Amino acid sequence: MALTTRRLFIAILFLALFVMATREIGDPDFWWHLSTGKYIVETQTIPHVDVFSFTNAGRPWVTHEWLAEILIYALYALGSFPLLILVFPLLITLSFVFVYARSPGKPYVAAFAVILAALATAPTWGVRPQMLSLLLTSTFLWILDRKDRSIWLLPPLMLLWVNLHSGYALGIAIVGVYVFDQIITGFKVQGSKFSLLFVLVLCIIAVLFNPNGATMYIYPFETLVSPTMQAYIQEWFSPDFHLIEFQPFAWLLLATLAAIALSGKRTSLTQTILLVGFGYAALRSARHIPLFAIIAAPILAEHVWHIIESRGWAKGVPTNTPTTRMTTIVNWLLLTMMILAGFVRIAIVISNQNATERAKFPAAAVDFIQSQQIQGGIYNTYAWGGYLIWRFVEHPPARVFIDGRADVYGDMFIENVYLKTYRGGTDWREPLERYNVRVVLIEPEAPLAAQLARDAVWKPVYVDKQAVVYVR
C-alpha cells in the first residue's frame, strides 16, 4: 500500500497521541481500584460494604466501577504495570479516533481540532476508570452523529458502561439531548420517527442491570452535590487558568466560540445544548474538561472548515496528489523513525514506573512498617490510603483510616474526623482515641506532625523527606 503524505500525517497524529498519553501511573486512586479488582477476582464477590478501612468497615459501598477494576487487575495480572501503561493510552487514543471521525476538514483541520482537544484533556489522562467513560462518551457521540441503524448499539453499550463507571449518566444525557432535538425538528431521521426515543428508554432500563440495582440512578448525582468532594478533591475544582496545564482548554473554548462567530454558519440545537452544558460543567470542574473537549473539537473543525470553504481557500489544497516511489519510501522511513522514537519514549516511561511510585507514595515508610511488623490501626494521609490498601493486601499490619473513596466515608467523617485530626486543632487527639489508632503515617510538614512531635505519648520511629511514622 502506498503511504501517501495524507496517510503519513494521520498515522503520525495518532501515534503522537498514543505516545503523549503514555505516562507513569501516579493517580492515588489507582491503587484501591487495583485492590478492589484483586478482591473481586479472588473472592468472586462484588463488595457492597467497605472492606478496606477499620474506621468505616461494613459501611455501604456502591462499587460502581467493579468491571473496570476487574479489567485493571486482569491487565496487571497478565502484564503488570507495563501492560496497564500501554492499554490505557490505547483507549485514550481510540477516543480521539472517534473525535477525528466526527470532524470535517480531514485531515488537517480535523487534526488541528483533535490536537487542541487532546492537549486540553491531557491533565486528566492516566490509568483510571474515567478513561473508559471518555471512550464511551466519544463512541456514543460518533454513533448518534451517524444517524443510522447503529443507534441500536447504544443500549448494549449502556449495559456495559453502567458496570464500568458512573459516568454512564453522560450517555443518557447526550442521547436525551439528541431526542429533544428530534422532537423540536420533527424527527427527521432514518427509520421509525420514534426509534431514538425508544433507544433512550432502553438505555435507561439498561442501567438497572448492575450489582447495585436502582441505586445507580441516583449515585452519579450524589457525588455532584457533595460539599467535601467539591471543596477538597482537586479534580473537582474549577480550572485555574494561571496554570499552564489549563491553557489548552482556554484556547479550545475561545477558538470554538470565535470560529462559530466568524463562520456565519448556524450550530444545530444539539450542538448548542451540548456545547453550553458541557462548557459550563468544564468551567465549574476540571474533571469535565475532557467531555467538553470531545464535544467541542468537531464543532470547531466544522466551522473552521466552513470558513475555509466559503472563502475559496480549500481550492488550493491538493486532494489526490500522485505518490511517487521515492515519496513512498521517504514516508515509510519517516514513519519508521517516529515509531522507533515512540518506542524509546514508552520504554523510558515504563522503566520510570518504580521511581514514580516511590516519589509519589510513601513506599520506603511502608517498607519500614512491614519490616518492623508494626501492628495496629494506622492513621494515614488521605491521598496515601489507596496505596496503603494495595501494599497491605499481601502483608496487612492494619487496614487504613481513610482512602480516596470519599463517597464511602461521607462528608461528616472527612470533615469532623479525618480533617479534625489532620489539621492539628485543639481536639486532634479525640479521633485517634476513638478509633484506637496506634500508628500515624503522614507527611513531615502536615499540621498533625507538629502536634505529634510535641506529644510525649507519640514517638517518631521513621522519618524521611516524604513521610514520618509515629507510634504509641
Image: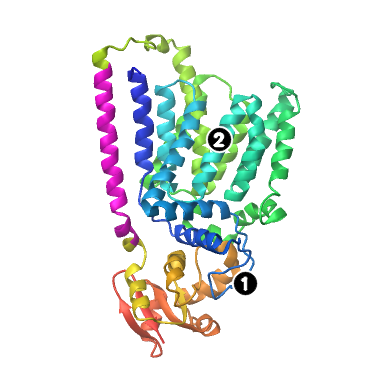
Looking at the rendered structure, the secondary structure element under dot 2 is helix
| Residue sitting nearer the eye, 156 or 171 | 156
Locate residue 397: give its quadrant. bottom left
| Residue sitting nearer the eye, 82 or 201 | 82
Look at 54% across and 44% down and name the residue there: 133
Position of the N terminus by quadrant: top left
Q: Which disc number belongs to residue 58?
A: 1
| Residue sitting nearer the eye, 262 or 187 | 187
Give residue 25's position: percent from left, percent from top. 38, 54
Dot 1 amino acid type: Gly
Instruction: Examine the structure image and report whether residue 335 is included in the region drawn in magenta.
Output: yes
Position of the C terminus by quadrant: bottom left
Q: Is disc 2 in contact with disc 1, using a CB cutoff of under 8 Å?
A: no
| Tally of numbered tags | 2
Look at 42% across and 12% down and name the residue there: 314
Task: Determine if residue 90 is in view.
Answer: yes
Q: Vertical placement of 238 versus 403: above or below?
A: above
Question: Callout 1: few (<14), some (14-19), or many (20+) C-alpha neighbours within 10 Å?
Answer: some
| Left or right placement of residue 11 versus residue 272 in this view | left
Give residue 308's position: percent from left, percent from top. 44, 16
Dot 2 amino acid type: Thr
| Residue at the bottom extreme, as displayed | 456
| Left or right placement of residue 357 versus residue 179 in this view | left
Looking at the rendered structure, the secondary structure element under dot 1 is loop
The figure's colour scheme reads rainbow
Q: Which residues are magenta?
A: 328-357
Give residue 185's position: percent from left, percent from top. 71, 23
Locate residue 199: give its quadrant. top right
Q: Which disc number belongs to residue 139?
A: 2
Instruction: Examine the structure image and report whether residue 252 is included in the region drawn in magenta.
Output: no
